Amino acid sequence: MKSIFKYLLIVLVLGFSTSCDQNFDDLNTNKVNATAIDPMFQVNQAIISAAPSSFGILVYEVGAVQHVISPNSGVLTGANFNQDNRASTQSNWQQYYRNVIKNTKDALVRLKADPTRNNLVQMTRIIQAYAFMVLTDTYGSIPYSEAGVGFSQQIFFPKYDAQDLIYADIIKELDEASAALNASGRRETADVLYGGDVEKWRKLGYSLLLRAGMRISKANPTLAQQAVTKAFAGGVITLNIDNATIRHDANYTNPIGNTLNATEAANFYLTEPFVNFLKNTNDPRLSAIAVRYVGATSGPTQTVDRQTYDPALQIGMPMGNDNTGAVQAAADLGLASFYDFSQVDRRRMVKLTSPNFIVTASQTLLLLAEARQLGWITTGTVEEYFNQGVRAHMLQMASYDPAMSIPVSSIDAYLAANPFNAATAIRQIHEQYWISSFMNGPEAFANFRRTGFPTLDPNPFPGREVLFINRLTYPNSEISVNSENVQAAISTQGPDDLGTKVWWNK
């Protein structure tokens, strides 16, 4: 009997173990976990992350061009004192490599197997070229040819490429990708930028090609003129309806708006040079951009009942002040405190749902004005492009908030009172580009370095490291992990500091 029970037990155990093994794979497979992702979603993430919206832009680029400044030190040390703060100079590096380049490179690898998605390939190339342009304009030599391929090619320590080589390839990429877009091909309707509209993407690609060409106009005039000529022939953004706009809503808020409506609401102010420039020309954009909380003595007292948009009452914060200096500057001007200086209006222009702009009609038209002045294009007049560029930016104000709309009559009056002068064409063009790129820190910073306009006085802060910031420094994390390649770049480019000029900055 014992033997019978013994055999029965063995049979039961074997049967149970066999039944447990059946459907094992099904039981241990997550049926809701994605095993693949549509590359369009990766490209959308890249597009959204390409917006000039990182915290470091507030600390460096918008201050370097004397748009917006903070008197505070610590984490906010940067262009306010013309000092190096690598906790913030790394901002563009991390945003664009982690969130843009990583996604575009991977998407391009996976799209190779699908010839039906040619348009998405070209869209990806365009947004990737834009990201690399921001990166190289910010830092100079950067990982380019080997960047973002850690997974696909197992390159974990990418070499750095020189900026002249990077720009040559960026121009090639923008030229080829813009031309290869096909209106009869598949429309990528999930695209968050243009809904897959190929013609709008083509205009963006050629507008970036125009920007790239003008950026190197002094460093490589021959290549620059070729790029500009192709861009103009291809068709660029000349209407606000085609602006490359990153939109925000209550669920996906504007990162800079979020910062300026939260922890840093009372810490950033419009600069004296910027406010005075707009006041001196009776520019109607000042009443759209600026707000002043008259009599405010602290952040909590910057209340709605104190706010004024009256351009005559706007007062910008003088450059080069820490907290102590800002207090004295406010007292010298008869203000209640430095909280009484003008700010960019966080309830309108930099509210949580405000858009970010990558490329605008105003910027493109002003670059066309410069190209026409140089004789690189022969259609239209410099004055026409100039006036259209100014008008486009004033009309663009309404896209931030309807309350910022500027009447056409006010635009006409401004242009009549501040007419284009052929003798000062380049200066006027880039003074307007400076205004048109307000809050687009990377672009304003790059164009200011390239052209030298507007004419700004050096930051007078006593502890400044440089008169003007020419580039941002490499992240400490990159120096420690990819040291050999970083040092090779430094040995060719120059010291890793704020004063070293990038290749095109002649």
Image (cartoon, rainbow, N blue to C red):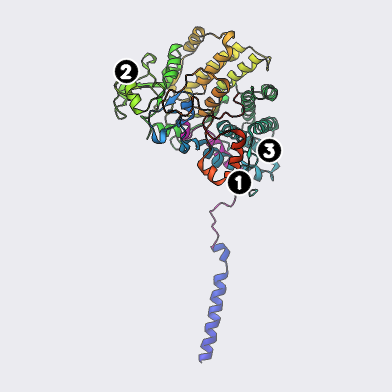
Whole-angstrom CA distance, mark 3 to mark 2, is 62 Å
Residue at (37% x, 13% y) in the render: 312
Mark 3 surroundings: few (<14), some (14-19) or many (≥20) residues within 10 A: some
The residue labelled by disc 1 is 157
- Circle 2 SS class: helix
The residue labelled by disc 2 is 332
Q: Nearer the viewer, residue 345 or 5?
A: 345
- Circle 1 SS class: loop
Residue at (57% x, 44% y) in the render: 483
Q: Is residue 114 magenta?
A: no
For marks 1 and 3 on the same chain, the one whose residue lies earlier in the sequence: 3
For marks 2 and 1 on the same chain, the one whose residue lies earlier in the sequence: 1
Q: Which residues are magenta?
A: 28-57
> In x, y percent, where is residue 1?
51, 92
> In x, y percent, where is residue 287?
41, 17
> In x, y percent, where is residue 225?
68, 22
Whole-angstrom CA distance, mark 1 to mark 3, is 30 Å
Residue 118: image tag? 3
The image quarter in which residue 39 lies:
top right
